Image (cartoon, helix red, strand yellow):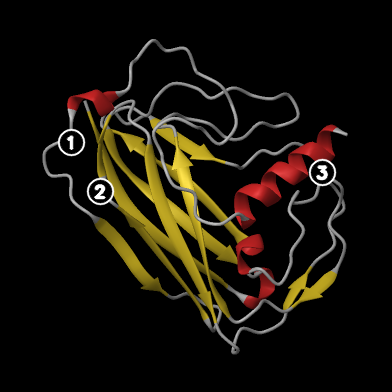
Amino acid sequence: MANDMLRALAIALLSSACVTGCGGDKEGGGSGGDGDSSGSDRGVPPGAEPCAARDVQGTIPGVTISIESSRCVYWRGEPAEFVYTVTTDSSVPPLEIAASDGCGRCVKPSSDPRSFVTYQISGLSTAGDPQQYCLCDMGCCAPDDAATVQVDATTATQAIQWSGRQWTGPSDTDNPEDEFFAPGTYEVEVTFDGQEQGSVTAKLAIEIVR
């Protein structure tokens, strides 16, 4: 039952339409309890402007990824929203999904290109400490079945709602979110993984300031 609920969460996160409003809700997990208040009550940090990485290509034909945000400089403890767009055309080859022996991906591949997308926000703080936010650990889901999937020729958009905290996913134990990212320069990384057919990764640099 727990695996079914986690699988439903993952599918909803990857296939829902663009969500507005990044001021409060988090993508799962609770407070890390580090005692820091949100930086959003201090106004916009100096140097904060709209930013984007557009039409990034990779090793799989017919796929491009763009990431954009209203700004890429945030106070420590401030939530943020990043919107990515995956564009696929008719030249995308059929994607061969290998069967897995152990835990599966928790997201069933489909004709929706977002079912092949993962993301993370990561990097090193100014002090050199690694920081990461992702849905990397969804617990152990049923093994993947071998399949061949043809994605639609379409443009699909998704919003990443980020609390500003560190987190690697709920796992099987409903892991809470951790402390806020420390000041530093990081990357929002969005990847379309076509496995043996290739991949595309777009990166958007962001900065966290105190």
Label 1 belongs to which residue?
Answer: 44
Question: Residue shown at 61%/35% (left/top)?
Answer: 169
Q: Nearer the N terminus, badge 1 or badge 2? A: 1
User: How far across and how far down the image is residue 155, in percent?
Assistant: 52, 74
Whether residue 127 sits left or right of residue 25 in the image: it is left
User: How far across and how far down the image is residue 30, in percent?
Assistant: 56, 21
**Local secondary structure at mark 1:** loop
Question: Residue shown at 70%/51% (left/top)?
Answer: 11
Q: Quick one: 52 or 195, which is closer to the camera?
A: 52
Residue 150 image label: none
Circle 1 residues within 10 Å: few <14, some 14–19, many ≥20: some
Label 3 belongs to which residue?
Answer: 141
Circle 3 residues within 10 Å: few <14, some 14–19, many ≥20: some
Circle 2 residues within 10 Å: few <14, some 14–19, many ≥20: some
- Quadrant containing the C terminus is top left
User: How far across and how far down the image is residue 195, in percent?
Assistant: 67, 68
User: Separation of disc 1 and disc 2 at Cα?
Assistant: 9 Å
Whether residue 1 sits left or right of residue 18 in the image: it is right
Task: Name the front one of labels 3 and 2.
Answer: 2
Q: Quick one: 11 or 94, which is closer to the camera?
A: 11
Is there a contact, CB below 8 Å, between mark 1 and mark 2? yes
Question: Residue shown at 50%/75% (left/top)?
Answer: 87
User: Separation of disc 3 and disc 2 at Cα?
Assistant: 36 Å
| Residue at the bottom extreme, as displayed | 91
> In the rendered structure, which amino acid carries the disc numbered 2?
Arg
Question: Residue shown at 42%/33% (left/top)?
Answer: 131
Q: Quick one: 97 or 25, which is closer to the camera?
A: 25
Residue 71 image label: 2
**Local secondary structure at mark 3:** loop
User: How far across and how far down the image is residue 38, in percent?
Assistant: 32, 22
> In the rendered structure, which amino acid carries the disc numbered 1?
Val
